[in-house]
Image (spheres, rainbow, N blue to C red):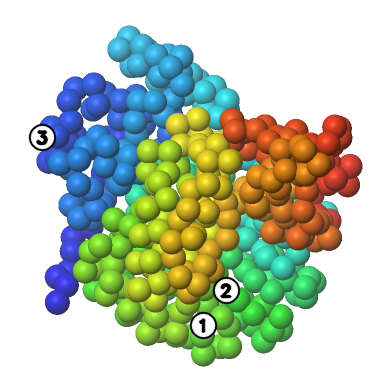
Amino acid sequence: MIETQDYKVYSLHNFDQIPQINQYLNADQIRAIEVVGHVLPFKVNNYVIDELINWENVPHDPLFILTFPQKDMLEKEHYELVDQALKNEIPLSDLRKIVNDIRTELNPNPAGQQDHNVPIMDGQRLHGVQHKYDQTLLFFPSHGQTCHAYCTFCFRWPQFIGDKNLKFAQNETSDAVKYLKRHPKITDILFTGGDPMTMTASRLKAYIEPFLDPELEHIQTIRIGTKSLSYWPYRYINDKDSEGILELFERIVKAGKHLAFMAHLNHPAELKTEAVKIAIKNIKKAGVEIRTQSPIMNHINNKAWIWRDMWNTQVKLGLIPYYMFIARDTGAQHYFSVPLVKAWQIYKDAYRQVSGIARTVRGPSMSAHPGKIEIVGPTTIDGDEVLTLNFIQGRNSDWVKRPFFAEYDEKAKWLDDLKPAFGKNKFFFETELIDDVKLN
């Protein structure tokens, strides 16, 4: 029997009230949380603190690094700039300018999210909606633009810093429903954020029910991208409206939609608690399929055995391993990034150690501006050592499953670091890529 838990949240303003902070961290580590937390968003809750983090292993514990800002997550010059500003107690307006200038350098909206993924309907941009791939529409409910705790690697960090110019959000569903009715090729709608599962059951229901309209029969799958299974599993056990959430899930399934719960799980330690195991059973009992995904990240899961254990544990619990991603080129990428060749080697080594039932996972994959690009692996062609890549998704659907080749480069960490192989000036898609938003 799982006891009902009080929900306590800590951020930059009250993290010194966490009992473990003064017990396990030194003054420099506490200072780093304060400095980096002024630039990158910081939020954590009591479940993560008490049940996930191994404080005896801090500062090396992966769940601690996943949720608490670390000094090296900022470049040295940026860290010193903020540190000195705080020491000098400069005016708040001056501090904000320093912080905003640093954030601008961190590529806050990578892969054309603001400029090229927002659709246009009747001459107006649909804010809070993205349509990059033919079959899938992303919807950002405004009431779900927070999380139970913030991941330090999160590529959606601009959603949490209070800058309206960097934030995606949609209050109403009417425009999205109208857009979907005009685009019958769209089969999937993905609720994302932030985390939609921070909303109350009634609020989430208000957002989802319009998409169950019989006129939207072409919408086959509703996906919910969420970290809640790891960061607050009580949401599906005995939270204040857990029954309402599970009943909503059943309602979606009974309406004939496939409900895919896209769980962000970054380390096997997130699956160790009794609470998460009960939550998984309750979600699956409601007829929901749980798929799992994570970026591969330095300091957290950059070992093959971690991925092997994570995939095996997920399968044992009835989850479906779905994606291994490359850390996006934003925020603290310099801290988390793993070179593409090394990421592929880790994937390969982990993949060969699991049975076929766990080999549903795809990757390593970059969600770059042209599309979702898989690192197939290095090979030699006519004496040239090259890196083989492949489109899993593309802005142009004709690119999908078209292999292409880059010069072998052990240091490359992102698509922009790669050069076309065989002396070519461009990759095939660069001449076809039109830097424009999708039109109505």
Is residue 405 something that shows in the picture?
Answer: yes
Q: Dot 1: what SS? A: helix
Q: Residue furthest right?
A: 431
Tell me which residue sits at (65%, 33%) in the image: 409
Tell me which residue sits at (14%, 70%) in the image: 3
Rendered view: 288 above or below 342: below
Q: Quadrant of residue 13?
A: top left
Q: Quadrant of residue 200?
A: bottom left
Count of labels in the image: 3
Near-viewer residue (395 or 309): 309
Q: Is residue 342 left or right of residue 127?
A: left
Q: CA distance from mark 1 to mark 2?
A: 8 Å
Question: Residue 317's spot in the image, x, y percent?
Answer: 35, 74
Q: Tag on residue 23?
A: 3
Q: Residues within 10 Å of mark 3 (few under 14, many from 20)?
A: few
Q: Which residue is mark 2?
A: 222
Image quarter where the N terminus lies is: bottom left
Q: Dot 2: what SS? A: strand
Nearer-N-terminus badge (1/2): 2
Near-viewer residue (173 or 27): 27
Q: Residue furthest top?
A: 88
Rendered view: 255 above or below 97: below
Q: Which residue is mark 1?
A: 252
Tell me which residue sits at (51%, 82%) in the image: 252
Q: Mark 2 and mark 1 in contact (Cβ < 8 Å)?
A: yes
Q: Residues within 10 Å of mark 1 (few under 14, many from 20)?
A: many
Q: CA distance from mark 3 to mark 2?
A: 44 Å
Image quarter where the C terminus lies is: bottom right
Q: CA distance from mark 1 to mark 3?
A: 46 Å
Question: What amino acid type is highlighted by mark number 1?
Answer: Ile
